[in-house]
Amino acid sequence: MDAPEIRYARSGDVSIAYQVLGDGPFDLVWTPGALSHLDLAWEDESRARFARALAAFSRLILFDKRGTGLSDRVAGIPDLEARMDDIRAVMDAAESEAAVVCGVSEGGPMAVLFAATYPERTRALVNYGSLPRFVRGPNFPWRQPKHEYLAEWEAEAHVWGTEEAARAWLESQGLETTPEAVRDRARRDRLSISPGGLTQLARMNAEIDVRAVLPTISVPTLVLHRREDPVPIDGAHWMAEQIPGARFLELPGGPHMPYYGDWQAVVDAIRDFAEPVSLQAARPYDSVLATVLFTDLVGSTAKAVELGDRRWRELLEQHHARTRTELRRFRGIELDTAGDGFFARFDGPARAIRCACAIRDAINELGLEVRVGLHTGECEIMDGKVAGIAVSIGARVAAHAAAGDVLVSQTVKDLVAGSGIEFYERGPAQLKGIPGDWNLYAVTSAT
C-alpha cells in the first residue's frame, strides 16, 4: 500500500493536513500523540506497518494536529477546544459522519473532549497510553508536579532536533541507535515541531484537566495501556473507572508508542473492541457535554422606569439584537429568552467565554450593564433544549455574578487551558440547591 495522498481540511482559518487509507466498513480517526508528520511517518517502517494494519479493517483517517507536522503553525498556544475542532474539520473533509475516535498519549484529552461533546459523531472511543491530565493535582497523584514537568520539557527544548536528543528517544523506545537511525530521528523531530512550539505545547498540557468530562462520556469506551509504559498505568485505570461502562485492557510490556514493541497486540485490541461496536446500529444519545451561558441585565427595572415603556422597549430590542448577533458569531444556540436575560449553549467553553465578553461589551455600548454566568457539564437533550443539573449550576453561577462580570465554574476554567483566557479567582461559593463549595472565577481577559 503506497502512502496516501496528503489533503487539507479547514478548521477556522487553520489548515489541517490529513490522509485517508483503507476501505473498511467503519471510520477510525487516529488522534496522534504530541508530535506527528504525515509524510515522514511513512519513512518509518514500524509506523507504516501499524497504519496499514489498522487500515486493513477500517477506513483510517490520520492527521497532524495544528502546530505540528504538515498542518499550519499557529501563533501562541493551541488550546484543547480548537484542537478538538480539528477532529471535526478533518471528519467533515473526509466525509465521515461518525467514527471510532482513538486518542493516543497527548492526543487522549482532545479525543475525550470530542467524544463527550459530539457523541452523535463518535461510534466509540479508544484511549491509549494517556491520562486526563499531565501533571499532579488534587486527588490525582500519578504524575509529577507541574514545575518538574515544565522543567523537563524546557530541558528537552534546549536540545530539540539534535542527535543527542534523538538517540535518547530511540533508546527509550527500545529501538536501534545506528548513526543513520539517529540522524533520521533528529530530522523528523525538527520537521515535526520547533523548539518554541514544543515549549508552548508543554505549557498548554500542564494546564489540561478533563477529569470532569470523564463521567459525561456516553459512547462505548476502551482504555488501553501497556504495563511498562512510563505513563503510570494506575492513572489510566483510574480514568477508566470514571467513564460509565468503560473497559480497561492492560497489555504486557512497553514501550510507550503503540507501533513499537508488540504492536500487533495493540492493533488486535483496537480491532476486537471497535468492530462489533461500530457495526451495531447507531443509537440516539440523550445527553451531551455542553457549556451553558446565562445573561441578565443589571438594574433593568430602574432603567425601565427612568425611560418609560416605549423607549425601554426600543432599548430592549437593541439588547436582544446585539446579543443574538454575538451568539451567531460564536456558534451559540439560543435556547430561551426570559424578559431581559438569555439562556444559550455552546459546544466549546472558550467560544462561550469569548461570546459572553462580546455580549457584555456590546451591551455596555447601549448604556446598560449585564452579568453572565457559565458552566460546562453533561446536559440532557429534550426537544432541542437542554436540561439537567449542569443547567442549574450555570444559572446559580450567573446569580453570583456582579455587574459586568463574566463568571465561570472551575470546570470551565480547566477546559480552556492554553486559550489565553485569564481569570481572577473569586474563591469558593455556595450555589443554591447544589451541594458543596464551588470555586468561581471571573474572566479578566479573553483575547
Image: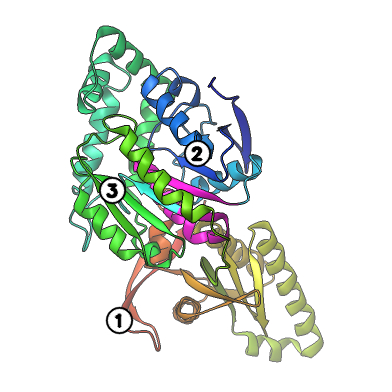
Circle 2 packing at 10 Å, graded few (<14), some (14-19), many (20+), is some
Label 3 to label 1, Cα distance in Å?
26 Å
Residue 138 vs 71, above or below: the answer is below
Circle 3 packing at 10 Å, graded few (<14), some (14-19), many (20+), is many
The residue at the point 39 percent across, 26 percent down is 47
Q: Position of residue 111 (x, y in %)?
A: 44, 50
Q: Is residue 131 left or right of residue 340?
A: left
The reply to whether dot 1 and dot 2 touch (C-beta < 8 Å) is no
Q: Depth check: 238 or 148 in front?
A: 238
Model colouring: rainbow
Earlier-in-chain disc, 3 versus 1: 3
Label 1 to label 2, Cα distance in Å?
48 Å
Q: Which residues are magenta?
A: 98-124
The residue at the point 40 percent across, 61 percent down is 413
Based on the picture, tell me whether residue 100 belongs to the magenta stretch: yes
Earlier-in-chain disc, 3 versus 2: 2
The residue at the point 36 percent across, 24 percent down is 46
> Mark 1, mark 2: which one is toward the viewer?
2
Name the residue beneath numbered marker 2.
57
Kind of residue indicated by mark 3: Phe
Kind of residue indicated by mark 1: Gly
Residue 132 vs 163, above or below: the answer is below
Circle 1 packing at 10 Å, graded few (<14), some (14-19), many (20+), is few
Which image quarter: residue 386? bottom right
Name the residue beneath numbered marker 3.
134
Kind of residue indicated by mark 2: Phe
> Mark 3, mark 1: which one is toward the viewer?
3
Name the residue beneath numbered marker 1.
436
Q: Is residue 163 left or right of residue 103?
A: left
Secondary structure under tag 1 reads: loop
Secondary structure under tag 2 reads: loop
Label 3 to label 2, Cα distance in Å?
32 Å
